[in-house]
Amino acid sequence: MKIVFDTNVLISGFLTTSGISQSVFSIGIRRHVVICSEFILEELEEKLMKKLEAPKESVEQLIIFLRKRAVVLSVPHDNEIKFSDANDIPVLSLVKVSKANYFITGDRKLLEIKKMGPTLFLSPREAIEIL
């Protein structure tokens, strides 16, 4: 199966040693194909280092790990996608292009979409039951 993780799930998985986000990420990365975009990696790095002041070395190791273990795509902005939060459009563009089986997010507005093409939108709690 192909999985796209939203940045908020990756952050939660990085910051905790246990919990649903960390568990679902671990299962995803070990058993499935994880798909990321340059946008998600940049957003992840920015939020961890600037907003959460995570150690630079740890963040760099995470980005290197994701680049090695995930399929990283450069996705053009999709002008056809309309969403209330413009910052989520690059992520939705990735979901659309990747044709992933699942998009895992904690964002309630994104979860309201429920499905885009073949991709089901799941919370980490829903995903842990499926994966």
Image: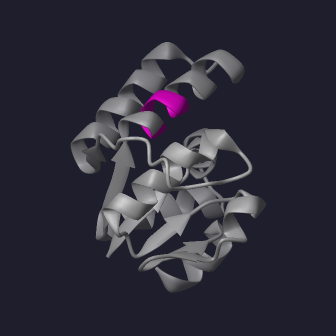
Please determine whether, in this image, residue 19 is positioned above or below residue 63. below
117 vs 21, left or right, is: left
**Front one among 80 and 129:** 80
30 vs 92, left or right, is: left
60 vs 22, left or right, is: left
Residue plotted at (67% across, 53% down) = 83
Q: Quadrant of residue 108?
A: bottom right
Residue plotted at (46% across, 79% down) = 131
Q: For residue 50, say whether it is visible.
A: yes
Please determine whether, in this image, residue 26 is positioned above or below residue 123. above
What are the residue bounds of the magenta stretch? 40-44
> Of all residues shown, which one is farthest toward the bottom?
130
Color style of the picture: one colour
Relative image position of residue 102 (x, y in whole percent): 46, 72
Residue plotted at (70% across, 21% down) = 51
**Front one among 28 and 89:** 89
Asked if residue 14 lies in the magenta stretch, the reply is: no
Residue plotted at (60% across, 26% down) = 48
Please determine whether, in this image, residue 82 is positioned above or below residue 46. below
Q: Quadrant of residue 61?
A: top left
Please determine whether, in this image, residue 92 is positioned above or below residue 57. below
Relative image position of residue 44 (x, y in whole percent): 53, 33
Q: Quadrant of the N terminus?
A: bottom left
**Front one among 79 and 26:** 79
Give the number of marks.
Answer: 0
Relative image position of residue 13 (x, y in whole percent): 57, 49
Dominant SS type (magenta): helix
Q: For residue 29, say whether it is visible.
A: no
> Of all residues shown, which one is farthest toward the front?
80
